[in-house]
Amino acid sequence: MRSRDVAQATSLRYLAATIPASRRPTPLFNALFVALALIGLASIALADSSTLSASDQPRVIVTSDGEIDDECSLVRFLLYANEFVVEGIITSSSQYHAHGHNWAGDDWAQPYLEAYAKVYPNLVKHDPRYPKPELLQSRTLLGNVKSEGEMDEVTPGSQRIVEVLLDSPDTRPVWLQAWGGTNTIARALKTIEEQHPEKMAEVAKKIRFYFIWEQDETYQTYIRPNWGKFDIPTIISDQFLAFAYENQRQAVPQEVQHYFSASWMNQHLRDRGPLVALYKAHDDGRFRSEGDSPAFLHVIPNGLRSEESPDWGGWGGRFVKVRSNTWLDPVAEPGYEYPAGRWYTGSAWGRQRVKQEIPNDEVLTAYLRPQWRWIDAIQNDFAARADWCVKEFKDANHSPVVSIDGALSREVTPGEAVKLSASATDPDGDRLTFRWWQYSEADSAKATVTIAGIDSANDASFVVPDEPGKQVHIILEVTDNGTPSLVGYQRVVCNIKGN
Ligand SMILES: [Ca+2]
Ligand SMILES: [Ca+2]
Ligand SMILES: [Ca+2]
């Protein structure tokens, strides 16, 4: 097998259990997808799915070490609870936080859940899918917290992960996120290995990992050696630095830093009810850190389809495959060799570069771009949801809903003029602006295509470059003129035929 074929085969396998993205679920589509998947036609369902503007809510389990930036991330996460099936919010330790070591308390998440309960009656005016506070409460549990990397003890948190993964009638992917150490996840997997070794392969097929660094050793010492053979798709992010503490996001360009400024934050987050009131910005209001948020930003079904393959890119960054199942941040340095072991503060490329404190470090800026390029849209979307906590539907903004005419994934021929056409609606009746662009970093084509009618809803096109076997990724961004201005997306993936 040539390397490209290997990549494509993996990508297909990755796709097979992943349901394509959009904002509105329809039961008909879900039933159709399940039926097709059952008879082994999942990839055909995906090819045809573009005519069905629907998706399911991704299932997610958060594990968090309760640092201040996790607390900030939890506020944002709860505002997106309508987009997910929240299977668990589990406290874990890390190399930074554990019992007796900068510990926020076993019940650090409680004030946030209580505040969520207070704003829930208003949030459901904006989306009835927000989960009941009692449901979130019942799934918020203590994991392995006694020391860094501790995975000996079976805990309520580890058992919740076991329960979700062993629930065999449900084959949908489960995104296991590590905002801290991977130890509680490791403990859960060890329980499954010990008690149900015959189910490991089936369980592994459901799992998607997204780790914010490896904040303890358990991925290397337990998960990789024992579960590596199952090729669980694993993203380990270092580019989250663009969304982290000031000293870490220093290379983010000025025009983007604006969205972290006290003036912007105060304008959009002050007086937004009890949940956002708990958001631990700095005293003057400026952004503190949400280094862990990319773990769930990646799976928000916003139309970018980032959950379909880690190299496609989206709100949680963009990654390259460096080992059979492991996707890390793209390092542009010629001849760079990724570490064989942990990707963390002691080894990750961006972290090492940040330590060098190079003024106007354009190389670091470029490295972090897959994350910061979306910050304006990410922050405005956050601001709108802060409004949802206190405002009526008619007084708040909601994203445009975008629908592509024709397939989302297409087979195209070199020289062919591909027509790009879409429609969009806005829940608030806002005026909409269309913009098509090639996500050239995410696609395998070398050529930069010229898109005619770049701001046209239904009269845009481009000519397919002569690069058989490659892909061109076209993003459609539809922006409304509400306050704050919000964006809806779709992505058209064109597979160039030949060879
Ligand atoms: Ca954390
Ligand atoms: Ca709107
Ligand atoms: Ca390209």
Image (tube, grey):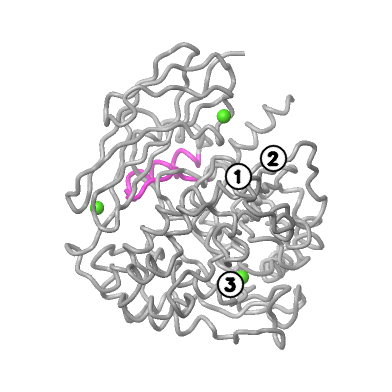
Indicate the position of residue 266 as horizontal and vertical percent values: 36, 72
Q: Would you name the residue on which mark 3 appears?
A: 160
Indicate the position of residue 416 as horizontal and vertical percent values: 43, 13
Labels 1 and 2 touching (C-beta < 8 A) = yes
Residue span colored magenta = 18-38
In three-dimensional space, the C-alpha distance between marks 1 and 3, rounded to whole angstroms, equals 39 Å
Q: Is residue 190 magenta?
A: no
Q: Quadrant of residue 153?
A: bottom right
Mark closer to the chain start, 1 or 3: 3
Is residue 25 visible in this depiction of the protein? yes
Is 269 situated left or right of 75 in this image?
A: left
Which mark is in front, 1 or 3? 1
Q: Is residue 362 above or below residue 183?
A: above
Indicate the position of residue 290 as horizontal and vertical percent values: 53, 66
Q: Would you name the residue on which mark 2 appears?
A: 332
State the mark number for residue 366: 1
Labels 1 and 3 touching (C-beta < 8 A) = no
Amino acid type shown at disc 3: Arg
Mark closer to the chain start, 2 or 3: 3
Is residue 172 visible in this depiction of the protein? no
Q: Name the residue nearer the viewer: 146 or 312.
A: 312
- The residue carrying pointer 3 sits among few (fewer than 14), some (14 to 19) or many (20 or more) residues within 10 Å by Cα, namely many
Residue at left offset 63%, top offset 61%: 212
Q: Quadrant of residue 295?
A: bottom right
In three-dimensional space, the C-alpha distance between marks 2 and 3, rounded to whole angstroms, equals 40 Å
Amino acid type shown at disc 1: Ala
**Element at badge 2?**
loop
